[in-house]
Amino acid sequence: MNLNESGHGFQAGDIVYVIYRNPHTQNVANVQSAAVVHDPDNPEALSIFLYDTYYPLNDEVAVYASETEAEEAYQYYFGDALEG
């Protein structure tokens, strides 16, 4: 279940899964766990903390409740075995 589409809320401390593209090699993507945290620049907002970086938690980010759901989405969109 893509949490953004389902309307489920997030709470700081939740562990979620995203499909992450390697910024150095754009043709490499994988499913990665991430933490939902309070945005350090705006404590009222939530962010995703992934690879020591904060990413805005908004409708542009597909976030999944389980690794299995994220892997299924990966297969749907990319059709290849997971990299990494």
Image: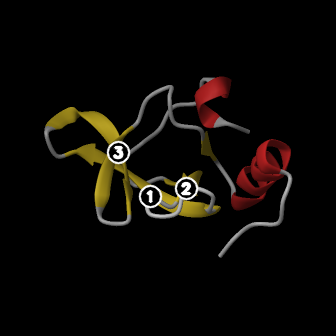
Q: Nearer the viewer, residue 12 or 57?
A: 57
Disc 3 or disc 1, which is closer to the eye?
1
Mark 3 and mark 1: span between their CA atoms? Answer: 14 Å
Disc 2 or disc 3, which is closer to the eye?
2
> Is 20 placed above or below 58 here?
below
Mark carried by residue 26: 2
> Is 81 placed above or below 27 here?
below
Q: Where residue 58 sits: x, y (%)?
A: 43, 29
Q: Earlier in the sequence, mark 2 or mark 3?
A: 2
Q: Quadrant of the N terminus?
A: top right
Amino acid type at circle 1 is Pro
Amino acid type at circle 3 is Tyr
Picture quadrant of residue 26: bottom right
Q: Secondary structure at mark 2?
A: loop
Mark carried by residue 55: 3
Q: Where residue 62 sits: x, y (%)?
A: 59, 38
Q: Quadrant of the C terminus?
A: bottom right
Q: Which residue is mark 1?
A: 23
Relative to 67, 81 lies left or right: right
What colour scheme governs how the chains and residues are painted in the rendered image of this protein? Answer: secondary structure
Q: Residues within 10 Å of mark 3 (few under 14, many from 20)?
A: some
Marks 1/2 in contact by CB < 8 Å: the verdict is yes
Mark 1 and mark 2: span between their CA atoms? Answer: 6 Å
Q: Where residue 23 sits: x, y (%)?
A: 44, 58
Amino acid type at circle 2 is Gln
Mark 2 and mark 3: span between their CA atoms? Answer: 18 Å
Q: Earlier in the sequence, mark 3 or mark 1?
A: 1
Identify the residue at horizontal 84%, vertical 44% (top origin): 76
Q: Secondary structure at mark 3?
A: strand
Seen as rendered, the residue at the extreme left is 41
Relative to 49, 41 lies left or right: left
Q: Secondary structure at mark 1?
A: loop
